[in-house]
């Protein structure tokens, strides 16, 4: 079946502009995660959605970052007033449930803020 | 303190030889999980292997095995019979089930190069 998809694959934006990144999880997966990977670094947790529960937003680096998940499926990560330090690859993952062992990752969106 | 430490930024191995990638972790949770992911140059994250903190046997998946030493808080990945396609970035990660739920905390990775 289809894996996790993300769009766009690449995004170049000017400093100060807002961007929206989209994640389509695997159908039926109730858990969805956003991570950020800066160049040459490991992944940094941003936010986690599980079913209808309140999301775990503890990894969001500032109030310029927000995310929503509509209808328990598609998720959008929004970065307002982008800064150069926001440049990174944003990875989305989903799993069949919150405690499932494997998180299936999407291909990521490479964000470049000029 | 770093929760996941990977001390080898880069490793080289000859094709068909075994290689060990180091990972140490720090947690006060009793229930946690340890993961290894592979990230080829294409950027996708590929799950390799999982070890639960209460698992008494070391996890194995094909050519991958996890050398779990709980008292030392280490979870090294052993790749046997290396192949050219194993060249990639490898990340160790931890899930602290009591304090952090389902999120994963990643190390900074080890770049493995397999030489022919």
Image: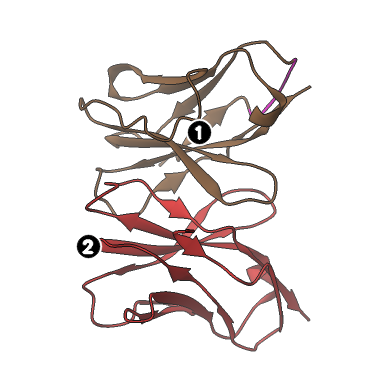
Chain colours: A brown, B red
Dot 1 surroundings within 10 Å: few (below 14), some, or many (20 or more)? many
**A10 drawn magenta:** yes
Disc 2: host chain:
B
Q: Position of residue A75 (x, y in %)?
A: 41, 23
Q: Which mark is residue B31?
A: 2
Residue positioned 59% across, 58% down in the render? B108
Disc 1: host chain:
A
A60 vs A77, nearest the viewer:
A60
Image quadrant in which you'd find residue A10? top right
Q: CA distance from mark 1 to mark 2?
A: 31 Å
Chain part drawn in magenta: A9-14
The quadrant of the picture occupied by the C terminus of chain A is top right
Mark 1 secondary-structure assignment: strand
Dot 2 surroundings within 10 Å: few (below 14), some, or many (20 or more)? some
Residue positioned 22% across, 52% down in the render? B98
Decide if residue A26 is in sight here. no
Residue positioned 57% across, 13% down in the render? A80
Dominant secondary structure, magenta: strand
Which mark lies nearer to you, 1 or 2?
A: 2
Mark 2 secondary-structure assignment: loop
Residue beneath label 1, please? Answer: A5
Query: Which residue, as the protein is rendered here, is positioned at the far bottom?
Result: B17
């Amino acid at each position: 079946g289809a894996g996790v998809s993300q769009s766009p694959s690449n995004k170049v934006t000017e400093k100060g502009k807002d961007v929206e990144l989209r994640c389509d999880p695997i159908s039926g997966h109730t858990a969805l995660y956003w991570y950020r990977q800066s160049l040459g670094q490991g992944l940094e947790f941003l936010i986690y959605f599980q079913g209808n529960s309140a999301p775990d937003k503890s990894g969001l680096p500032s109030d310029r970052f927000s995310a929503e998940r509509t209808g328990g499926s598609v998720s959008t990560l929004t970065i307002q007033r982008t800064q150069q330090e926001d440049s990174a690859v944003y990875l989305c993952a989903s799993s069949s449930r919150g405690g499932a062992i494997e998180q299936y990752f999407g291909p990521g969106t490479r964000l470049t803020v000029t | 303190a770093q929760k996941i430490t990977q001390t080898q930024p880069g490793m080289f191995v000859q094709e068909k030889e075994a290689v060990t990638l180091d990972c140490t972790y720090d947690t006060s949770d009793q229930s946690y999980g340890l993961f290894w992911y592979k990230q080829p140059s294409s950027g996708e994250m590929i799950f390799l292997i999982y070890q639960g903190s209460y698992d008494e046997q070391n996890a194995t998946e094909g050519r991958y095995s996890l050398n779990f030493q709980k008292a030392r808080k280490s979870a090294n990945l052993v790749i046997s019979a290396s192949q050219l396609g194993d060249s990639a970035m490898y990340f160790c990660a931890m899930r602290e089930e009591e304090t952090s739920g389902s999120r994963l905390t990643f190390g900074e990775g080890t770049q493995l190069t397999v030489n022919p």
